Image (cartoon, rainbow, N blue to C red):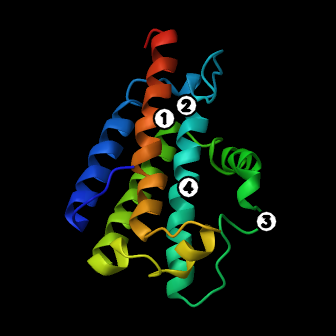
Amino acid sequence: MKSYKSKNALKEAINKAYMKYDQEFIGIPEAMKDVRIEGVDRTPAENLAYQVGWTTLLLKWESDEQEGKEIHTPTEGFKWNQLGELYQWFYQQYAHQSLRVLRKQLKENMEMIVHMLDAMSEKELFEPHQRQWADAATAKAVWPVYKFVHINTIAPFTNFRTKIRKWKKINQL
């Protein structure tokens, strides 16, 4: 995983990965948003629903912590060994929406994540034990907040961009 030297470097990487990812959905017809293709594990709507789901959870963890609420990671009703079920829940919650709505929701989440990062100090971002939700989410590893941000934004945007590109290529879009 890439290490970032500053908050600004992290925000730039997030924005760059997000913009590249989002651009891949331009030109996909709404009528094809749920088309499943052999060799690609998610439809375009599921691909976006996954991103909306994880970014929403990241924001919820921080919001719950700031409000002094009990934090459930990954989320209430799911344990870390139930990620497949969690992804299905993401699809049920979000994938029925249009690609336009999903892209808009993801954009709003990304804007809120950048705002969340702006509100954090460099210490809060890059040193461990700065957020209860970060500590609660890892049993043995000690991760600073930036690693969770990376894993829930930059990494999947990069990986899933490849998947949506393959989906588009097979569909000749």
Quadrant hosting residue 98: top right
Task: Report the residue at 47% width, 53% height from top.
Answer: 151
The CA distance from mark 1 to mark 2 is: 10 Å
Quickly name the residue at label 3: 77
Query: Residue shown at 53%/72% (left/top)?
Result: 134
CA separation in Å, label 2 and label 3? 26 Å
Which mark sits nearer the N-terminus, 1 or 3?
3
Residue 32, position as x, y percentages in the image: 57, 22
Q: Is the residue under label 3 in contact with that under label 1 (CB below 8 Å)?
A: no
Q: Residue at x 45, y 8 (%)?
A: 172
Residue at numbered disc 4: 54
Q: Along the polypeptide, which appears first: circle 4 or circle 3?
A: 4
Observer-side mark, 1 or 2, equals 1
Q: Secondary structure at mark 1?
A: helix
Residue 114 position, x and y percent, is 32, 65
Residue underneath mark 1: 160
Amino acid, disc 3: Gly
On the picture, is 116 further left or further right than 141?
left
Q: Amino acid at mark 4?
A: Trp
Q: N-terminal of the two: label 1 or label 2? A: 2
Neighbor class of circle 4 (other Cα within 10 Å; few <14, some 14-19, many 20+) is: many
Q: CA distance from mark 4 to mark 3?
A: 15 Å
Q: Secondary structure at mark 3?
A: loop
